[in-house]
Image (tube, rainbow, N blue to C red):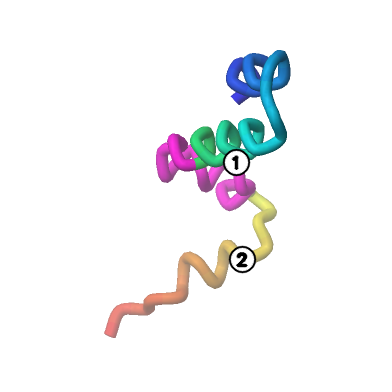
Amino acid sequence: MEATAVRVRDSGSSEQHVDAAIQWVLGLSPQDALRKAGCLAEGFWLRDLLENFWRPT
């Protein structure tokens, strides 16, 4: 993201910044997206809900 942001910052409009950020987020793997969102942190406040949301029936 940083390299993309620097490239866009040097020449571009705010729309280009937004487009670059969207592409970066969409390019994240599911694991990276969870990590960046903080969902994999030990103290994540919704961890119990996520782990127990779909209980076996």
Res 46 label:
2
Distance from label 2 to label 1 (Cα)? 15 Å
Looking at the picture, tell me which residue is in the foreground, 8 or 26.
Answer: 8
Q: Eyeballing the image, is 29 above or below 2?
A: below
Image vertical order of residue 30 relative to residue 49, above or below: above
Which amino acid, mark 1? Answer: Lys
Of badges 2 and 1, nearer the viewer stands: 1
**Quadrant location, the C terminus:** bottom left
Q: Magenta stretch containing residue 27, yes or no?
A: yes
Q: Earlier in the sequence, mark 2 or mark 1?
A: 1
Q: Is residue 43 left or right of residue 53?
A: right
Task: Name the residue at 49% across, 38% down.
Answer: 32
Count of labels in the image: 2
Q: Position of residue 16 (x, y in %)?
A: 62, 32
- Name the mark on residue 36: 1
Q: Position of residue 13 (x, y in %)?
A: 70, 30
The boundaries of the magenta stretch are 26-41
Quarter of the view holding residue 44:
bottom right
Circle 1 SS class? helix
Q: Residue at x 45, y 75 (%)?
A: 53
